């Protein structure tokens, strides 16, 4: 059952730690986008929800927000079980139950001012907390129904487990709590050749590297419409490599060989880009295999 007061409580909790506006998205039960309102203030979202709730229920649409702040960086820790939720409890300002046994926690961090540093620290925090490495940073609003095919006909309602108004952390505090994974070793801008692993027998073909050109041709257009989205091409290629049995480290090294974008990112001192891309792609590939078994 939908609960408007629970939705307002969640939004107020975000505002208490520095959220100043939200992107508001509607997704149908299949995960297709049905509406989008960017840069909504807290007042605008609160004013909209009483009008949106009836239609969301009638159409089985999910109401999703992505928070933004000027002086705070938000990290979403998704797919936590009860033990994981207890472990991160001292650091979070908001925890949600999105479905029975599945939890999500939010951390607000005050001292991340550089975009690349924020991205790297968020990745390390998710890894250290044992959360989903590919969390999107957007969430269903508490008090709304979680419409997914796998839950029908008993769709769960997103509920608040705990809200700690105003709880903002620093990177040092999170590190002291033991929640932050160690930095990944940087890849050198000079690619060190790896000894190829040669497979034999019926699975030998699985160990061949994917064709990067095909990943590039299959990638969606970039924002400017001037060509393929090379970041997505890198991700797709890494995911195919993971499915063929290549390790994250092997894939990261090979990506620098085949991708102009990866080489450019390394040249510009973003040496973690190949490893992060390979890590996220491997996680996505693993999740896809789990869905296939389920």
Image (cartoon, rainbow, N blue to C red):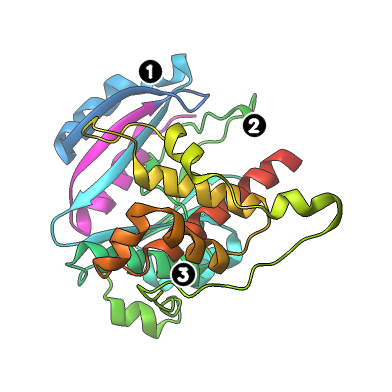
Q: For residue 101, say whether it is visible.
A: no
- The image position of residue 25, as x and y in percent, is 32, 30
- For the residues marked 3 and 1, what is the alpha-carbon distance in whole angstroms? 35 Å
Figure quadrant of residue 2: top left
**Does label 3 or label 2 sit earlier along the sequence?**
3
Q: For residue 6, say whether it is visible.
A: yes
Q: Which residues are magenta?
A: 1-26
The residue pinned by badge 1 equals: 54
Figure quadrant of residue 216: top left
Q: Secondary structure at mark 2?
A: helix
- For the residues marked 3 and 2, what is the alpha-carbon distance in whole angstroms? 28 Å
The residue pinned by badge 2 equals: 150
Residue 256, placed above or below residue 293:
below
Q: Which residue is at a point 17% across and 67% down the rendered structure image?
A: 113
Q: Which residue extends farthest right?
A: 201
The residue pinned by badge 3 equals: 88
Residue in front for this viewpoint, 2 or 119: 119
């Amino acid at each position: 059952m939908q609960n408007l007061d629970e939705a307002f409580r969640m939004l107020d909790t975000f505002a208490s730690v520095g959220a100043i506006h939200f992107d508001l998205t509607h997704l149908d039960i299949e995960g297709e986008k049905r509406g989008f309102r960017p840069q909504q203030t807290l007042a605008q979202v609160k004013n909209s929800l009483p009008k949106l709730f009836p239609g969301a229920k009638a159409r089985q649409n999910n109401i999703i927000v992505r928070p933004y702040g000027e002086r705070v960086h938000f990290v979403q820790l998704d797919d936590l079980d009860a033990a994981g939720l207890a472990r991160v409890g001292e650091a979070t300002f908001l925890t949600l139950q999105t479905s029975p046994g599945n939890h999500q926690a939010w951390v607000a961090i005050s001292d991340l001012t550089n975009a690349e540093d924020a991205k790297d620290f968020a990745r390390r925090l998710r890894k250290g907390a044992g959360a989903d490495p590919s969390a999107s940073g957007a969430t269903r609003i508490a008090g709304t129904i979680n419409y997914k095919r796998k839950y029908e006909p008993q769709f769960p309602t997103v509920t608040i487990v705990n809200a700690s108004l105003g709880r903002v952390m620093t990177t040092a505090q999170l590190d002291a709590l033991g929640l932050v994974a160690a930095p990944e070793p940087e890849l050198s801008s000079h690619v060190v050749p790896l000894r190829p692993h040669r497979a034999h027998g019926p699975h030998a073909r699985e160990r061949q590297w994917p064709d990067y050109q095909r990943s590039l041709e299959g990638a969606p257009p970039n924002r400017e419409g001037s060509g393929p989205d090379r970041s997505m091409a890198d991700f797709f290629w890494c995911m195919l490599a993971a499915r063929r049995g290549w390790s994250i480290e092997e894939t990261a090294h090979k990506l620098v060989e085949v991708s102009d974008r990866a080489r450019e990112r390394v040249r510009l001192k973003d040496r973690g880009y190949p490893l992060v891309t390979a890590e996220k792609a491997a996680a996505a590939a693993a999740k896809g295999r789990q869905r296939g078994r389920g």
